[in-house]
Amino acid sequence: MPQQGRANVQAIFEQDLFNFCCGDPVYELNLLVGRVSERSVTWMINTSKSLLRAAGFELRRVHPNSEDDFDPTAKRIFNWLKQLNIRTVLDIGANTGQFAAQIHKTLPDAMIYAFEPLKDCHEQLVERMKNAPKFKAFQFALGNEAREIEMHRSRYSPSSSIRPMSPLHEKAFPYTKGAVSERITVKRLDDIAEGLTLAKNLLVKIEVQGFEDQVFAGGAHTIQKAKALIVETSFESLYEGQPLFDEIYAIAKRMGFVHHGNLSQLLSPVDGSVLQADGIFIKANGTAD
């Protein structure tokens, strides 16, 4: 491999390995396969194994349709949900089913409704969850009004958003650049909730890449009934016009939810600063409407 090519591959590898070691919950090693040659991937895997083994860690392969690829510690970090007797889950921003698969494994008796607007991601979501009897997927986004809109489809699908990606995002994660437009449908959660069987207790997970405030605006009545929320919150603007943590915290607090910490945090590979966190919000006194 030419020296410059090896340097580029090493730079990509160091960035991805940093994310892997520092807790990026949506890290997918198979993303590398689409960016570099098979020889380069072999070199990176062997190097990473040596580095991680020296640090006391083990690198294992994750299969795309495995229930374990949302997060290797998911069995542990979701156990607290069992104590809340969750019977219904709304997975808003489901992507290919990473979260849905783990929640189904943790709460097998809960009904899961998943929302994913991108066509190919929705198809993968349905395929992944095909053996889950209490699961239904919808191919549309949730927002503050019903409409048709162009979505910014990233090469790295979990980074796709209705809002344009910010320069900070592109600098921190250059492999997410190169968005194309995809026409999607947006509906209001409160409008479609009447057609869902929302048995108590309700968990709402929102991971919509900077569109969180619009989901709350169009689903306030439904979200108000939840016992717990898991919301992706940002501390820096990764998407243009997005709400930051303080705004999401204020919305949740007005609804009677209390912040109970974070499931995980996303660190910048540039300087190690915290960019995002999956915030946990539980209804005050454990009650829900």
Image (tube, helix red, strand yellow):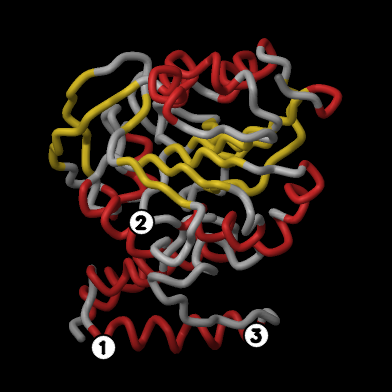
Residue underneath mark 2: 125
Foreground mark, 3 or 2, reads 2
Q: For this view, does 105 lie left or right of residue 213?
A: right
Local SS, label 3? helix
Q: Earlier in the sequence, mark 3 or mark 2?
A: 3
The local secondary structure at tag 1 comes to helix
User: On the picture, is 265 further left or further right than 286?
Assistant: left
Q: Seen from this angle, which residue lies furthest top?
A: 254
Comes first in the chain, label 3 or label 1 = 1
Q: Residue at x 54, y 55 (%)?
A: 25
Q: Of the residues shown, which amino acid type is indicated by label 1?
A: Arg
**Label 1 sits on residue:** 39
Q: Residues within 10 Å of mark 1 (few under 14, many from 20)?
A: few
User: Seen in the image, is 89 located left or right of residue 63?
Assistant: right
Give the mark, 1 or 2, whose residue is nearer the N terminus: 1
Amino acid tagged 3? Ala
Mark 2 residue element: helix
Percent x, y of residue 76: 73, 61
Q: Give the amino acid at mark 2.
A: Leu
Residue 177 at x, y percent in the picture: 23, 47
273 displayed left or right of 165: right
Q: Could one spot residue 170 in this view of the protein?
A: no
The residue at which mark 3 appears reads as: 54
